[in-house]
Structures are given as C-alpha cells and as structure tokens.
Image (spheres, helix red, strand yellow):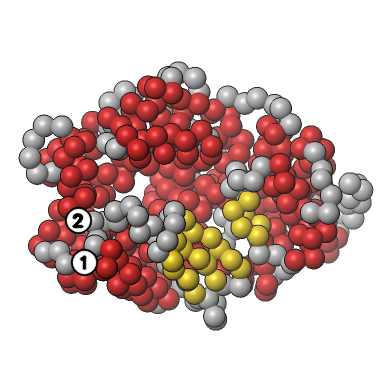
Amino acid sequence: MEPFIYSGEVAGDERDMDAVARFYVKCVLWLGKHDPLYIGAYFGPEAVRDEALTVTVPPDRIAGYAADLLATLDRIDPDRLEGAGRTRRAYLLGMVGALKARAEILAGQSLAFDAEVEALFGVAAPDGGPDWYGELHAALDADLPGSGDLAGRYQAFTASYAVPRDRLEEVFRAAVAESRRRTAEHIRLPAGEGLEVEYVGEACSRYLGGGRSLVRVSADRPVTVGRALFCACREGYPGRHTMWAVREASLVRDRGWIEHAVVPLASPLATVCEGAARFAVDAAFPAADRVRFEEEVLFPLAGFDPADAALVDAVGTAAADLFFSGTARVAREYLGGSISREDAFGLLRDVLLLSPERAEARLRFVEEFRAYSAAANEGYRLVRDYVGTPDDPAQRWERFARILTEPVMPGDLAGIPG
C-alpha cells in the first residue's frame, strides 16, 4: 500500500478519508476471502469488488494496511472537520480498528474471549452471577400451564401456538405489512425498496442491494405467532432491511461514503445492527400495542383464540431474554475455557430450555461465530437504554431512527441523548 500524504487542509482531510474508506473496503473484501463468514453484505460498486478480488492478500499484510489507515486517520484533526466529517472519522477509526484485530486473529494472534469482544465489537463481554437466569425462570414458571419440568412445559406451550403451515404466509404477510406501515410513518423508505420472502430451507435473511432483501422463513420448524411478528420486524421493518436500504441510499449513494457499502460481521457495526434488529419489534410495537395487534389480527389469522395473546406474548418475551442473554454467557464461559463443551450443551438445554436438537445447533453457532452472540446481546442493551421510554412516541422513534440511519458506534449509544 502506498503511504498517504497528509495535506493538513480540511479539503485534503476529506480526500484523505475518501482514500482511507476506499482502501478499507478493499481490505474487508480481501479478508473475506480468508473468512467466508466475515462479510454479511456488499452493495458497493462492482468495479471495486472485482478489482479487490483479483488478488489474494494474506491476513498479516491486511493487518499492516489497517495500521497504516489508522495512522492516517490519527493525523486528521477532528477539530478541523465539519460535524459530518467528525462522525465519519470516528466511524472509520472504529471499523478499521476492528478490521486490524480480525486480521491479526486470522494471522495467528490469540485473544482471550473478553479481549476479543472488545477488540472486534467495541463492547465489554456480559457478566453475571450464577443465578442470573433465576428471575426469568420464575416468570416462565408462573406463566406456563402445569407444573414440573420447566423445559418440557415451555416446549409444549410454544408448540401449541405454532402457526399452521397453510396459514404461515398470511400471518407473516400481515406482520410485514403492518410493521412496514408503522415504520414508514417515521422513517423515509427509499423508492423501490422491498422484501422478497421465501418459505423454504433454513431461516435466514440477506440484503441484496438496491433496496431489496431476501428473507427466508423456515417452513420446517414451528413458528409461533409472536415469533412471526418478531421476525418481520427484525429482518424487515424497522430492522435489518430498513437499516441497510436507508444507509445504502443516504450514505453510499447520496454522500458517497463507500465504507458503508460493506457489512463486516466482526465489527462495532454488527453490535449496533444486531441491537437495533432485536429492538425493532419494541420500536414498532410497544408491549401493549403489540398484544393488541396480535389479538386483533395475527391470532385470528393463525386460528388461535385472541384471548391467549397476552399470555403468549409474556412467555415469548421472557424466553427471548433468556435465550439471548444466556447464549452470550454460555459463549463467554465455554470459549473462555471455564466450562467444557458438555457443560455448555447442558446449560443451553437446561437453563435456556432448548430441545437437545436446538441446543446442539446453538452450540455450533457459538463455536462458529464466537463472540458475536455476546456483542449482539450487549448491542440490544445499548439500543434499548439509548432509546429509553420517553412519553412522546415521536421522540422514541427519533432516537431509534438515528441508530438506523446514522453511522453511530456502540460508544455513541452509551449515554442518554440530549
């Protein structure tokens, strides 16, 4: 990499950041050749990707390039920049720093789990006492019918509210339509954006670029009514699809900030994205409003008694908190070396109340994505606390929209907005 020549002028600073951003994108694309799970999406110029992928650059050299980029950013005085320029510089510092850390790990450097979470995702790993799940288990025990084995009661309860396959598309379509309507009242969606939904294979979502996303809803695994709404919000509106569609239009196309055209999964951006995606259902459907929509629309479409909506929602909310926070803690203990794989499997089954099949699948996810679940859980806490519970719904949406549409880092969400 040719060294940057720092100009010392504001206009030069902007050109320097353009050069940093373009080379940063190439470095991410190069690193993706060594780590197939590293890049979640790319929607930048094809010429940039084609040029980058004509060569293979080893991780240690990418780490060196990242260090050069950080040095260039350090030479740019933020006081000489306009507000947008300062925001851009801070974003690049966080993302390039995470790129350097990931490249060093792929080059053979070993990091303790807590250090990995901080270096890659910009947050601290979750901590908690041995009985962190006690209140959640107590809430589920009080709500679930019957007595005895909590895991068995929970699994039987959720199975009884699984949407029949012949009603799933109608339920999901209604959930997407209403979540999109509510989102569009507060966030300007780009022209031509939209979701393509499939009901085959494994559940997943992918942003395709151009304001389009593909969402796969597994027709083979039971989907409860509440899960359908959660998925519609998390993957669609106002979650991942909304975030990438708006950022592509406003940051990549309008401002020309190419660094936002690539989504590395081991990065502070992933922390913010995962937190916002999980919080999306709370933004679009605050608790009482969510139950009312499920009573009036989704439960009748699914063929269930609307009177059960409040109970199903309460169980689903507690179970989600247990699942996400528990996965983060299991990852920390297992990957940190304090428990064995067998012990980790037992926690997922007995504490998170997962079936043996789901516990094994979740354990493989932890092994494959490592610190990602810890970052996702912390990202949700940051987003939830930042948005808060102001009495004015418009203010609540304003705070959440900032997270979706502006290049904020985890540290930007640590304080309460003014």
Q: Are marks 1 and 2 in contact (CB under 8 Å)?
A: yes
Residue 309 occupies which quadrant of the picture?
bottom left
Determine whether, in the image, residue 36 is placed left or right of residue 132. Answer: right
Q: Position of residue 335 (x, y in %)?
A: 50, 26
Residue 378 occupies which quadrant of the picture?
top left
| First in residue order: circle 1 vs circle 2 | 2
Name the amino acid type tagged 1. Ala
Pick whichever, 66 or 312, lies toward us. Answer: 312
Name the amino acid type tagged 2. Tyr
User: How far apart are labels 1 and 2 at the CA level?
Assistant: 9 Å
Q: Residue 276, relative to residue 208: is it above or below?
A: above
| Secondary element at image label 2 | loop
Q: Which residue is mark 2?
A: 161
Residue that appears at 8% across and 35% down: 147
Residue that appears at 26% across and 68% down: 167
Q: Residue 386, relative to residue 258: is it above or below?
A: above
Q: Residue 12, relative to residue 331: is it above or below?
A: below
Q: Position of residue 13 (x, y in %)?
A: 81, 58
Q: Position of residue 34 (x, y in %)?
A: 71, 41
Q: Which residue is mark 1?
A: 302
Pick whichever, 237 or 146, lies toward us. Answer: 146
Q: Position of residue 383 (x, y in %)?
A: 43, 51
